[in-house]
Amino acid sequence: MRLDQHPAPTGTDPVGTRLGRAHPNGIARAADTAGRARDLYDDVATASAAIVIRRYSTSFSLACRLLDEPVRTRVRNIYALVRLADEIVDGPFSAVDPDRTARLLDTLELETYDAVRAGHSTNLVVHAFAQTARTCRIGPDLIGPFFASMRADLDISSHDATSLSAYVYGSAEVVGLMCLRAFLAGEPHEVGAYALLAPGARRLGAAFQKVNFLRDLAADHDVLGRTYVATADVEHLTDAERDVLLDDVDADLAVAARAIAHLPRSSRRAVGAAHGLFAELSRRLRRTPASQIMRDRVSVPTVVKARITLGALVRGGA
């Protein structure tokens, strides 16, 4: 009997199968199966990033809900990697073996570059970030300075003006630029809008970081052994020095406010709410004696947060 006379199971090609030639239907089914597997892996990675944000930062997780999809998922994926790097540097195991901590950070950076290039990582948080980075064109120009600032936390305990500027750029301003990429991906005139809004994104990220430097002054100094305030004696911070620092914050916030008005509606409300929250923190820090800032972490009451968020929703809905 000739080969092509052998009966074949339904839906197969006896010649194509026996000679190693795949049937078009088989190729399509294999491609569909592989596509579903990739989608499942992407979904699990995204869910993992969301869990990281939800468990480590309740306030940030709630703020993300003001973002429309797919921007919400993109921003969560970015901040999950930021959180993972921060956990390596400042987490409960970081001080046990500083050399191992440095190696872990180096490994995470290299794995991030590789995942962005290849589109895959076995680290689910890195994989989620890579999907966002590839979609939103986040490259080494932003990733590199971020990891450089994380590495500085392992080596530098106090900053001068030059090193602090570089640290703020890498730890905060480039994160603002990553988020701006996420806000604008797929929007009309994306390239021009990015160039226009990038200064505001950088200044907003810087303002957030500088406010937290003041809020966490005691914890950074007493627990982590670091100082992010360029003053001679952080333990005896004066009200005048506090005001100089907050003047800088308020200048950053003023520039950022002008940019927020030009963001897409999908992100304008959330960014407006975050801006309002940190502007309120700046006001409360200014009313708090410098000596008390070293003892107590300044915060915004829940009812005030709700009022700020409502105002941002109303203004950002236009």
Image (cartoon, rainbow, N blue to C red):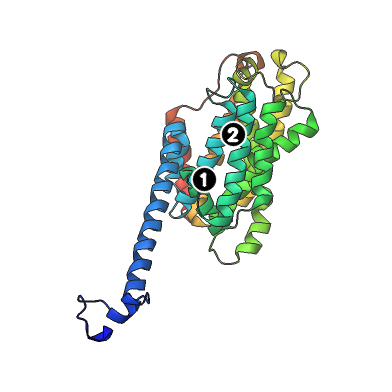
Q: Which mark is residue 126?
A: 1
Residue at figure coordinates x 70%, y 40% from the top left: 169
Q: Secondary structure at mark 2?
A: helix
* Pick the front one: 243 or 55: 55
Residue that mark 2 sits on:
104
Q: Please, is residue 135 above or below residue 3 in the view?
A: above
On-image quarter of the N terminus: bottom left
Q: Residues within 10 Å of mark 2 (few under 14, many from 20)?
A: some
**Mark pair 1, 2: CA separation:** 13 Å
Q: Name the quadrant containing residue 157.
A: top right
Name the amino acid, label 1: Val
Q: Relative to residue 318, is residue 162 depicted above or below?
A: above
> Residue 191: where, in percent of width, then height?
64, 63
The residue drawn where x is 46% and y is 41% is: 63
Give left or right: position of 18 versus 107.
Answer: left
Question: Could you say which is closer to the camera, residue 255 or residue 155?
Answer: 155
Kind of residue sitting beneath label 2: Leu
